Amino acid sequence: MASDSYIQQWTQRPVREILAGMVGTFALIPEVIAFSYIAGVSPAVSLFASFVISVSIAIFGGRPGMISGAAGSVALVLAPLVHAHGLQYMLLATLMAGGLQVIFGLLRLHSLMRFVSSEVRTGFVNALAILIFSAQVPQMLGVSWQTHLLIIIGLVIIYLLPRLSKAIPSPLICIIVLTAITIIHPMPVRTIADLGALPTGLPQFTLPQLPLNAETLTITFPYALAVAAVGLLESLMTASVVDDLTDTHGTPQRECTGLGISNIFVGLFGGIAGCGMIGQTVGNLRYGGRGRLSTFTAGAFLLLLMVVLHPWVARVPVAALVAIMIMVSVSTFAWGSLKDLFHHPKLTSLVMLVTVGVVVLTHNLAAGVLVGVLLSGLFFAWHTARLVQVRSTEEHDILTYHIQGQIFFASADLMADAMTYTTHAHRVTLDLSHARFWDITAVQALEKIVEKFRKHGKEVTVCGLDHAQHGILTEQSDEKAFTI
């Protein structure tokens, strides 16, 4: 990226960028605080993280206009680690995840996103929505009737207010109204203060207070790897949304390394790992944020509000967060995918359902995506193998096999099974003009076919061996094995 282009991403339309970033801050506040109790950490941990990520990703990221913060997907991954081992292990996992993301970016592993099919992405989003909603269920059980009433009021505000005006995000109005109700009429409901302390100053540099031994790394590394994978997946998906909405292109590799650097900073300042946030990013774009200044403003203004207004934020009822998270889960779920189950190919729908099932059962978003990708690859290989065709013609004592399609490990046996070695013809021709050999399994299958025909006393000729198309044959096979 040219330096003048980078500078322009900071200086274009500064007033609009700052205003869009401030609106993005108000969209960040309720969800970031809500995600903190999903992860089992104090609001300060998530708020510091969102401040650091926004500022850092604005500088080092590759997709201008994208809002990043302490997202629900990462919170869900780290929640079991926090509950089982505590905050220090989470900080170490955040540092390790950031390092892994930098390595992934340097190795250009972002290109693996091409192998994540649409149905796997849909399954990822649907599973994320289900996990976010399920995390709210404990907050609605065994609580006072006032809590249930506040949740209902909050949902009414969130869904009905945008029909009247969208000038201020409805989740923010939800927080203000429900907080005012509980202040005017005190009632037995939990507040944010019950979740943990809010920040009253700038984040402080810190290091995980843990022994760096094999046991610690064994506990932490699986979570770090999952956070790195899930964070990159959601960030790159968010970046692709920005690309589509703005008809521009970011730099995926830089986004990977930028997110990794940001998460390292987050871990060093006592925060929880984060990634791109689709909802906040779309909101930023809607209000005119296209450059890096809007992303920077979203984080800087967030810290300012939290430090100045933390006594009021502490009085926000948890019911408001539950209502917001219900809205987030409902809006995150791809409801159209339910209808698509009856219209899309069955295997495509199965991949989506399996992805959702694995994530919901394991509470591991990375595991679900991995299983979905593997299943997609398996179905693709099976479908491609079925397209292989082998037909034979016999003329003047010459039996010719016309092989057509993609020959690889899944289809090599189909090619071999189509051969008749006891034919009466004395000469056999294998026509490969319309076939493509992809791996050693396919080459070895061809060599075995030639060898078996020769054992039966046949003269074998292989034609159509174009080096540009079948380079693997000429490189890996014994050239004396074929008569061309």
Image: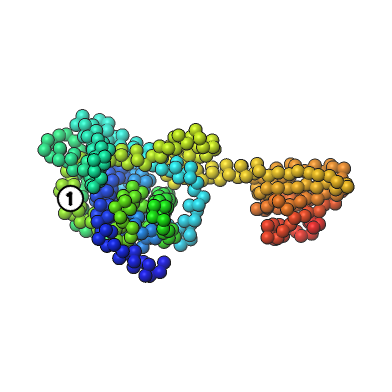
Please give the name of the residue rendered at 81% of the width and 53% of the height, measured from the top-left corner: 461
Q: Amino acid at mark 1?
A: His
Whether residue 78 is visible, yes or no, is no
Residue 149 sits above or below residue 93 on the image: above
Please give the name of the residue rendered at 22% of the width and 34% of the height, measured from the top-left corner: 153
Whether residue 240 is visible, yes or no, is yes
User: Which residue appears farthest toward the bottom when viewing the image?
Assistant: 3
Q: Quadrant of residue 200?
A: bottom left
* Element type where label 1 sits in the image: helix
Please provide percent x and percent y for residue 17: 28, 59
Q: Is residue 187 left or right of residue 465?
A: left
Q: Quadrant of residue 384?
A: top right
Count of marks overlaid on the render = 1
Please give the name of the residue rendered at 27% of the width and 48% of the height, measured from the top-left corner: 27
Q: Which residue is mark 1?
A: 310
The quadrant of the picture occupied by the N terminus is bottom left
Please provide percent x and percent y for residue 224: 40, 52
Please give the name of the residue rendered at 73% of the width and 52% of the height, measured from the top-left corner: 432
Please provide percent x and percent y for residue 415: 72, 45
Please provide percent x and percent y for residue 454: 83, 50
Viewer-proximal residue among 305 and 210:
305
The quadrant of the picture occupied by the C terminus is bottom right
Q: Residues within 10 Å of mark 1 (few under 14, many from 20)?
A: some
Q: Quadrant of residue 481?
A: bottom right
User: Which residue appears farthest toward the front when viewing the image?
Assistant: 164
| Colour setting | rainbow
Residue 10 sits above or below residue 353 on the image: below
Viewer-proximal residue among 112 and 222:
112
Q: Is residue 432 left or right of residue 290?
A: right
Viewer-proximal residue among 41 and 463:
463
